[in-house]
Image: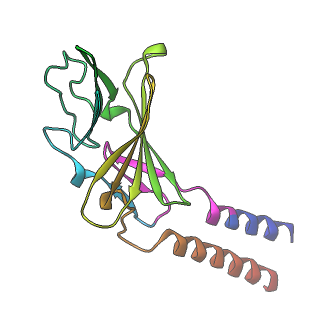
């Protein structure tokens, strides 16, 4: 009897375990829950120029989820990057490398079915800068980036786009989890009676 309870606990745990998004490339990942659901940011890539450019007074932020870009006149600070900050202070102008594509990691949030991309600038110690990009699924055709946090060592952007949505090739994760749990219950009941 104890072995059947143990089997049931394992089955329920497997049905409710945390889903992660496995990196396919620098601008997409696939959920590991067997559903083949994925995020693909390729359509919101600017190819030679950053797709997103958001300006405020004295500040311009650049971001491209897929293609490295170079900002002219950045004196090498923003060459081949995923994110860049151009700050203008009076007559002084300087650029800050916020992110490199090969440093991206993906963090999937099951509750909101959204993805957060975490980057850094490739530096170490006190020189490290981190950028988090939160993808927010929005219907329609517009693609918007908002700046949430801008500090010397941490930046956070919000990308609102239909391409920020979880995409699907097969059955939903909820259906798969329910199917696993039902199968485990049937096995458990079957073992008890036979």
- Rendered-image quadrant of the N terminus: bottom right
Q: How far across and how far down the image is residue 33, in percent?
A: 50, 62
- Rendered-image quadrant of the C terminus: bottom right
Residue 108 forms part of the magenta stretch: no
Task: State the count of labels.
Answer: 0
Q: Residue lying furthest bottom in this view? A: 193
Q: How far across and how far down the image is residue 102, in percent?
A: 33, 33
Q: Is residue 151 left or right of residue 189?
A: left
Residue 24 forms part of the magenta stretch: yes
Q: How far across and how far down the image is residue 47, in percent?
A: 15, 43
Closer to us: 93 or 124: 93
Q: How far across and how far down the image is residue 109, in percent?
A: 52, 54
**At 74% from the left edge and 69% from the top edge, which residue is drawn?**
8
The quarter of the picture where residue 118 lies is top left
**At 40% from the left edge and 51% from the top edge, which residue is drawn?**
135
Closer to us: 180 or 92: 92
**At 26% from the left edge and 41% from the top edge, which residue is drawn?**
64
Stretch of the chain drawn in magenta: 13-34
Q: Is residue 190 left or right of residue 1?
A: left
| Colouring chosen for the image of the structure | rainbow
- Compared to residue 13, the image places residue 158 above or below, namely above
**At 22% from the left edge and 34% from the top edge, which residue is drawn?**
68
- Compared to residue 102, the image places residue 12 above or below, namely below
Q: Residue lying furthest right in this view? A: 1
The quarter of the picture where residue 180 lies is bottom right
């Amino acid at each position: 009897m104890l072995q059947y309870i143990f089997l049931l606990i394992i089955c329920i745990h497997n049905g409710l375990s945390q889903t992660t998004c496995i990196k396919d490339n620098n601008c997409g990942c696939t959920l590991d829950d067997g559903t083949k659901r994925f995020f693909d940011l390729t359509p919101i890539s600017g190819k030679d120029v950053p797709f997103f450019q958001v300006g405020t007074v004295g500040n311009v932020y650049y971001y491209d989820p897929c293609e490295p870009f170079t900002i002219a006149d950045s004196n090498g600070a923003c060459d081949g990057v995923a994110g860049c900050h151009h700050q203008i202070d009076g007559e002084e102008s300087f650029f800050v490398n916020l992110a490199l594509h090969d440093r991206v990691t993906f963090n999937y949030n099951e509750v909101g079915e959204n993805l957060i991309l975490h980057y850094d600038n490739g530096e170490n110690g006190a020189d490290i800068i981190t950028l988090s990009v939160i993808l927010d699924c929005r219907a329609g055709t517009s693609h918007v980036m908002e700046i949430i946090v801008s500090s010397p060592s941490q930046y956070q952007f919000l990308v609102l786009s239909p391409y920020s949505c979880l995409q699907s090739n097969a059955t939903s994760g909820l259906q798969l989890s329910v199917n696993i749990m039902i199968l485990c219950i049937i096995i458990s009941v079957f073992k008890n009676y036979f």
